[in-house]
Image: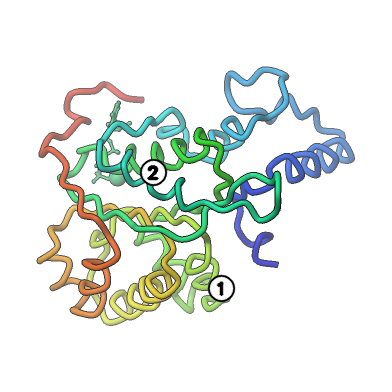
Amino acid sequence: MRRNRDPQTLADSTTVLDRMARILAARGIDQATVNAPGAGTEAYSPLEALSAGMPPRYRDAVATHPQVLAWARQVADQAVAPSTGARRQLTTGPSLLMAGVVGAGKTHQAYGAVRALVQAGIGVRWRATTAADLYAELRPSSGTDSEQVLAGYSRVPLLILDDLGAAKSSEFVEEQTYRLINRRYNHCLPTLITTNLAIGALRAYLGDRVASRLRQMTTQVEFEPVDRRRHQRVA
Ligand SMILES: Nc1ncnc2c1ncn2[C@@H]1O[C@H](COP(=O)(O)OP(=O)(O)OP(=O)(O)O)[C@@H](O)[C@H]1O
Ligand SMILES: [Mg+2]
């Protein structure tokens, strides 16, 4: 049930990809035309499937930050195979709060961290959203079942919650963030959070309850205050 709601499911990726290939074939679509860039006509590997599910900007992101790599090792060590011989799946683990100025490379490291786990042979069901997009999805006016949307983000084994603190503060923002973070906190689900705010400012923005949980569940990673976008001509 839950698996179907998570678009970026990599668990049992062979089965999923086989099913996808059958669906494409039934619709007369050549799978080679939907392969990841550079994948040619070869079958998807878990890494290629991963890249295809990432935004193009971060498809080649590699985690290099020592604390991010340490986090990936720790989470990989806690992965468990559901049955003998099966791929080990991400279960519980610590989270990261990556703080830094605009353009410091936080989102790059977050996607790179997911890649590091897949490269380590771990099955990872993950999702990524910016906090602002999440709040938009959760608003009653969005036309979605907001409880179901929140449940999806609350339960997915690994979540990238990007740009926490960038949306305008409100009671709604504080409440929805509390509900999400509290559930992930209770279930010890790894969450990669990026923010432009310092923890003190996050406390003022999201309230004591969220800040207290974040303090306990995350390792805080400070990025060098360099805007990489200023030094790169990027598409
Ligand atoms: N280690 C890296 N190697 C190469 N390019 C990088 C690296 N880190 C970041 N970049 C590039 O620098 C730019 C800014 O990185 P990113 O988007 O991750 O910053 P950010 O900290 O998330 O910024 P913001 O707070 O505005 O969201 C992007 O184009 C990204 O691809
Ligand atoms: Mg970012």
Instruction: Determine if the C-beta at disc 2 is less than 8 A from ligand 1.
Output: no
Q: Which mark is residue 28?
A: none
Say which of 102 and 155 sits in front: 155
Q: Quadrant of the N terminus?
A: bottom right
* Residue for badge 1: 143
Residue type indicated by callout 1: Gly
Question: SS at mark 2?
Answer: helix
Say which of 73 and 101 sits in front: 73
The colouring scheme, among rainbow, by chain, secondary structure or one colour, is rainbow
Q: Which mark is residue 72?
A: 2
Say which of 135 and 86 sits in front: 86
Residue shown at 38% from the left, 48% from the top: 74
Horizontal side of residue 163 vs 36, given as left or right: left
Residue shown at 33% from the left, 77% from the top: 178
Task: Please count the marks in the image.
Answer: 2
Residue 38's place in the image compared with 84, above or below, is above
Residue type indicated by callout 2: Ala
Residue 193's place in the image compared with 67, above or below, is below
Camera-side mark, 2 or 1: 2
Q: Position of residue 129 (x, y in %)?
A: 43, 55
